Every structure is written in structure tokens, then in C-alpha cells.
Image (cartoon, rainbow, N blue to C red):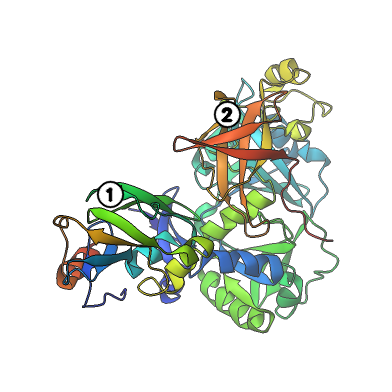
Amino acid sequence: MSRPTPLRDVHEALGATLTDFAGWLMPLRYGSESAEHNAVRQAAGLFDLSHMGEIFVTGPQAAEALDYALVGHLSALATGRARYTMIVDERGGVLDDLIVYRLGDEEFMVVANASNYPKVDAELKNRAKSYDAVVEDRSEQYALIAVQGPRAQEILATLTDADLAGLKYYAGLPGVVDGRQALIARTGYTGEDGFELFVANEDAVPLWHALTSAGAPYGIKPAGLSSRDTLRLEAGMPLYGNELSAELTPFDAGLGRVVKFDKPGDFVGRSALEAVKDTAPARRLVGLVARGRRVPRHGYPVTKDGAVVGEVTSGAPSQTLGKPIALAYVDTGVSEGLAVDIRGSQEPVDLVELPFYRRNK
Amino acid sequence: MSNIPDDLSYTKEHEWVAGIDDGITVTIGITAFAAEALGDVVFVQLPDAGSVIEAGDSVGEVESTKSVSEIYSPVGGEVVEINQALVDDPSLANSDPYGDGWMFRVRVDGDPKDLLTPEEYTALTSGDS
């Protein structure tokens, strides 16, 4: 049985198509996923992301413990700021990609993917053993609601006195939203401006309704995981299990910049990653745009003159481009004359720079 | 609950068939249930007009944001017409599955394969909706 989020009844009342995702019963879409996608690009979308994991690391050596446990330099993070980072194994393989928020000198919140957070929690506990720090999985206590899109700030501003205009991208601060305590973070996974609100489970339903009402004049729509996937794909953002896995290092995924070799001390995976950091991987992650209308999908071979030169990791019709797009691992050095084998038919694709979509700032 | 018109025949693959009673030319499309399950349809590939197909053949595909499904013809015969408007605007499969979203017409040759009555199709779709 899939676990429901605190918003399950709300989703059902909205007529959502529910789906199992990483053991959670989540809204796939409420109506047309294309309309939800476009609402986020043009106005705002409201997402239930309560399946994400929230792991707290606290104590005098919380920062040092995270410097050792993760590839990022978290002790250098200022309070109130957030960082995209990863946890890898001894071989440098990616166990999860994470956003870490520094809530205080001795308090961090690690946000992990739904499919991975029990593993991340166990790894963090293990890696923090010799540090004066406590690792606690509080995922069960928190709901996460995201408001994403160009109108997100205006909508949220009607419900809080927090200084949203002063809140930078990848920053988070505690605040009060509609009378409820929340961690207000300017983060997201859509390629748009927006906020993620971490709240106690019991506040999720009233906050959802408050955001729905406040957003109505701005055209807010509830948005499901289907549109979340096409939004992140257009923004060129990796999804664990598709673009990222324990078989790949951050360098394989073109995300070597998240590995901070210049931080003090050792960290898990350092020696393995040092060994590969200057070597071009056999395949690199690229963007593909289909010339036709058939959609390259996860697992389809990328070919050149009939030979397999790569594999699609994610693909979908792009609302913004009006064409199918895909992320794929393709042999280094190969960029012309590519096709995707779509159920036996070689459909031509063009290799493009990522991301497919970048918002106007 | 999806709309299931009572003057059509249905298949287990969630297609509808119109005009089966006169036994000459039938029209085939996907049901509202199928369209809702697929989500936004973005691409439809139909058989070529003039081609001869067998009942049970895979004759095309319907692709949505999240998935792709094959179209199985419930009847054999010659494809006499395809809905070019649907090819040009696949969202018609969502907005009007029993009307402007029709897929293709076949001049029937032989017996249709395992068609369901509206009552049987209602039972089928209420079991897994």
C-alpha cells in the first residue's frame, strides 16, 4: 500500500489522478498536465511534495559532520542559505542529490528524494558517528508545499509578512504563513522562481486552501508530478533514478562542480572522485530535441548510422518548445547525425545545449 | 465516471466502434476512459488509408505526456478514411473522444473480434477505475 500525504483528501476532492511514486500515493495530475505545466510557466502552480525527506543534523559539529558526509562544503554555508549537493559512496557513486539548508550555526536540514531518504538517513547517521552531531529523520513530521511560477512571490506575499523580496534564490528563513509556522525557502525544481514551504503535517491542508484562495486571482493551479517532471526536464535538472544513480559519479553526470575538493579534511568518496575528476567520461549527459513528433523515452537507445551511441534517461513532449525533448547519455565526441530508436524506428534528433528552457530574470 | 455512450460497441483495449450494426463501414476511436487514463494526448499514428488490416492487428499508436499505447483494430478490412484533423491536433482525443477525436474508418471484411456491449464495457472500466 502506498502512503498518503496529509493532503490526500484534498487531492481526491480536486479529482486528481493518484499514482504510486516511491511508495507514496501522489497526485499525477488534476486535469490536463499540459495546462498545469503552462500555469507554472505563466502564472503559478501549487505542488504537494510531502513525499520528500527532511533529515535534521544538529550539534556543535553538525557542519563538520556534513563536510565529511557530503561532497559539498557545508561548513562554509551561511545561516539562511541553501546548497544543492550530493551524497556519494566510497566509489564516488551518487546515492542521492540533496538540498541542504543551514538553519543555524549548529542546525542543518537535508532534503532528500522520497525514494532515497531512509538510505540517506542511515548513511548520515553512520558517517556522523565520530562527530558531536545528531542526525534525525523528521520526514514523518513535515509536509512540503511548493508555490512555483512568476506570480509565486505576489501570491505568497498576501499570506506572510516575511521579507520575500529580500529572500534570495537558494535561501530559506523561518516565518509565519497564514498564521502557521513555516520554513520559507526560495527553491524549486521547475526552472521558475518560487517557494517551498516546509510545515507541520497538521498545517498542510489549511495552508493549501489558503494558497489556493490567495492564488486564484493570479491563475494558480494545483499541479501534479507529471507536470513537475516535464518542468524539471525543460530546465535540464536531473532526476535521481534517471540521470543519477550509484553507478555514476557527479562528474559522469556533468555535475562535478558540486564536489568541493578544496574544503578541509577528508570526505566520503574523495579519493575515488580525485582519480576521475580530470578524465573525460565515456559518455556525457546531453539534451536532445526530436525533429518529429514521437517522444524519446527513458531507456530508448540513441543511435548514429544504426549503431548505439547512447541511451535516453528522460523524455517528454515539451510544452514550451512544442517538440519532444530528452536527456540522454551519449558517447563523448559524438554530436551530429543522431537518432533515437523509438520502438524500432530511427527518429532523427538534434543535440542541444542544456537547459532547454531558461526563464527571463 | 467516464462517459460511455450506449449506441457504441467497445473493446477491452478501450476503443469504441460505431456503425457495427449495418456491417459495412465502421468508425473507431478511443474511449473517454482511455483518454482520461492517458492524460494529454500529444501524438497519434494511424494506419494508412487504403491499407488492409486484420482484426487484432496493431495498426497505430497513441502517445501521451507519460506513456504510449498501441491501437489494435477490432475489425479487419480496408481502411477507407483516417482522421487527419486528429493527427494535426491530437488533443481532440481528449476534448471530444467520441466525436471530433475519431481515429479511422474501416470497410469491414469478416467478423469483428470480441466486441463488448456498453454494459460490459461499463463493468470493465468500473473494476479498475
- Secondary element under disc 1, as helix, strand or loop, is strand
**Disc 1 is attached to a residue of which chain?**
B
**Side of A12 relative to B120 (left or right):** right
Quick one: label 2, few (<14), some, or many (20+) residues within 10 Å? many
Q: Is residue A61 above or below residue A23?
A: above
**Disc 2 is attached to a residue of which chain?**
A
**Side of A234 relative to A229 (left or right):** right
- Secondary element under disc 2, as helix, strand or loop, is strand
Residue at x 82%, y 29% (from the top left corner):
A263
Q: Position of residue A160 (x, y in %)?
A: 73, 76
What's the CA distance linking mark 2 and mark 1? 31 Å
Task: Give the camera-side residue of B47 and B29.
Answer: B47
- Quick one: quadrant of the C terminus of chain A? bottom right
User: What label does residue B53 carry, if any?
Assistant: 1
Q: Position of residue A16 (x, y in %)?
A: 44, 68
**Side of A76 relative to B109 (left or right):** right
User: What label does residue A303 carry, if any?
Assistant: 2
Residue type at mark 1: give it.
Ile
Q: Quadrant of residue A246?
A: top right
Residue type at mark 2: give it.
Thr
Q: Is residue A40 above or below residue A103?
A: below
Q: Is residue A125 visible?
A: no
Residue at x 59%, y 43% (from the top left corner):
A239
User: What label does residue B92 carry, if any?
Assistant: none
